[in-house]
Amino acid sequence: MALLQTSILNTHDMPWESGLDYLRTLAPAFRDNLGPAEQVQANFAKYRQKNLYLDPLTTRRLDLVELEPGYSDLTHCCHDSVEEGFLLSGEVVLDGEGTLQAGDYFWRPPGWIHHAKTGPGVQLLLGFEGRSNESGPVTRQVCAPQQAGSNHLKPTLDEAALGSRGRLRQVRTGELVWQPGPDFARSQAALTGFDLTQLAVRVLSSNPRTGQQTLLLRLAPGYQQGSAGAHAVDWQMFVLSGSVRWGSQALGAGCFVHRPAGRVEPAMASAEGALIYAKVNGWMNFTPASHS
């Protein structure tokens, strides 16, 4: 079931899981459609991951994934689920979409046909939305190479094929404007208690109807929330650089937090500043504990 307690992971302390072990955590509708069975073991020897979040009911998941140099998918494919990724290092070629490098982001609605390969290797945060965010379960369907860039589930390519966030093939996040915290707050529900003057935000993707969104948060040195508090929706963050302090805990680069909706947690602070990749399952509402 979905996590009811806050989860804090230091990925540096987690062992890498082999690709074959990772496949055992996937539904048969995914792992049984990877391509020629005799090639799967050798292929996934170049794939490893650390699971950050997994909801067995919806199949929603987030993983830290590393593909070794020379990795290539065995077939072109599409998914019933949304797939989302943020590159931490390296480079990956997505047939039908583009060549993505460190700092690039993608959000792929269900059905879009693609193929991944990397020459130098790549490390990324890779997520499947599962049965959430207008997404279906995590599945994999083998598709013809000549169909790359088309949508297998909605071949008419109407608005339904794009979903509420659109088809974001390659977002160069370094080219996005940093929104000052007070400006960003006007698009959200209450952010009382956030240190908005020390916050800047890049919106990577968002659903304008539900508020579900993926963000980059930049905390300036000296960032300090006013008090403990709670978000109205599930909230996840991965520290990309710098560090934050959450109560007595110091969270440096590579730390991941899953914070369930409504759970009161200590105020977050950052003496040196930090850059955070955040996934919010609705408007980034925050209510200080003293006001709850």
Image (tube, rainbow, N blue to C red):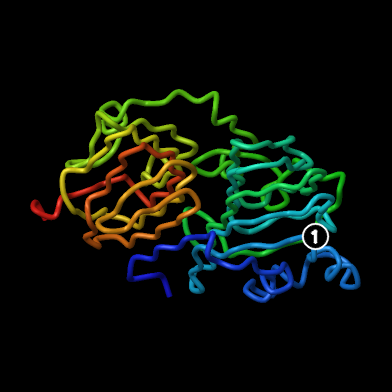
Q: Name the residue nearer the viewer: 202 or 143.
A: 202
> In the current view of this chain or complex, which residue is farthest to the left?
290
Which residue is depicted at the point 29% across and 60% down? Answer: 261
Q: Quarter of the image containing the C terminus?
A: bottom left
Judge from the rendering whether residue 56 lies leftward or rightward of residue 71; answer left or right: left
Q: Which residue is mark 1?
A: 142
**Residue 89 location (% of width, % of height):** 65, 42
User: Mark 1 packing: few (<14 Cα in 10 Å), some, or many (20+)?
Assistant: some
The kind of residue on which mark 1 rests is Val
Q: Name the residue nearer the viewer: 201 or 27.
A: 201
Judge from the rendering whether residue 5 lies leftward or rightward of residue 160; answer left or right: left
Q: Quarter of the image containing the N terminus?
A: bottom left
Q: Name the residue nearer the viewer: 3 or 113.
A: 3
- Quarter-of-image position of residue 8: bottom left
Which residue is depicted at the point 58% across and 49% down? Answer: 84
**Residue 289 location (% of width, % of height):** 13, 55
**Residue 272 location (% of width, % of height):** 35, 37
Judge from the rendering whether residue 246 lies leftward or rightward of residue 11; answer left or right: left
- Position above or below: 91 against 22: above
- Quarter-of-image position of residue 120: top right
